[in-house]
Amino acid sequence: MKRIGVLALQGDFEAHRKALEEAGAEAVEVRTAEELERVDGLVIPGGESTTMLKLLRLEGLFEPLRAFGERRPIFGTCAGAILLARDVANPPQESLGLVDIGVERNAYGRQVDSRVARVPLAEENGGGEMEAVFIRAPIIRRVGEGVRVLARYNGDPVLVAQGRHLVATFHPELSRDRRVHQLFLGNGQ
Ligand code: GLN
């Protein structure tokens, strides 16, 4: 059984821990570089990316996390997606740059902070539809070569993969469907 860490500095890490267990993994909370060394993959949850970034710096986890991503899979959701992206706008912000995408934060605007949508899933990932919960979500504005788009909403990519990494601008941990977490568990190892 894979042992997957959930970065537990801030945000909705508890929901991811449960989702990973339901998807068939052992899930543990990660707060230190030592704990990071003991997992096969990592989830960076949703939350507030600026706060998470500050905490990563404070805990000395930023560089270890980037190095971890060079050899192990990371799944970033929402704020986690922003941290994984190469370019961040609105406002610009430092990031791990492990996935070649450009994201715009809070891109759906203030009036429609949150929404629940149904998005079609690529055939190779089982097809059909999937519920997608967006909460002050970013929009992926640029997708680099080598990035695969697995699902779109309103024409914009909302689930993408590059190499071992997976990025969702929505919150799959808040829906009952575990296919996205299962997809991550089958990734890169
Ligand atoms: N709006 C947050 C940010 O920019 C992300 C929101 C979320 O993770 N649900 O960091």
Image: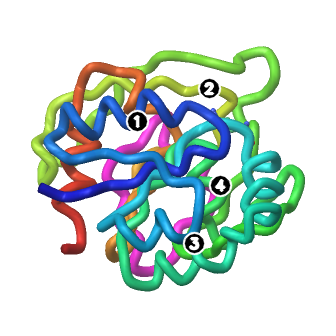
What span is colored magenta in the figure? 139-157
Residue type highlighted by circle 1: His
CB of residue at label 4: within 8 Å of ligand 1? yes
Instruction: From the top left corner, tell me how far across and down residue 165 is, in percent.
Output: 39, 67
Marks 3 & 1, CB-CB < 8 Å contact: no
Which residue bears the numbered disc 2?
135
Which residue bears the numbered disc 4?
82
Residue type highlighted by circle 4: Ile
Marks 1 & 4, CB-CB < 8 Å contact: no
Judged from the image, the secondary structure of the residue bearing numbered disc 1 is: helix
Residue at 41% x, 43% y is 152
Separation (CA) of disc 2 from disc 3: 25 Å
Which residue bears the numbered disc 1?
16
Residue at 66% x, 79% y is 63
Separation (CA) of disc 3 from disc 4: 14 Å
Residue type highlighted by circle 2: Ile
* Quarter of the render that holds ligand 1: top right
Q: Within the image, what quadrant is residue 11 found in? A: top right
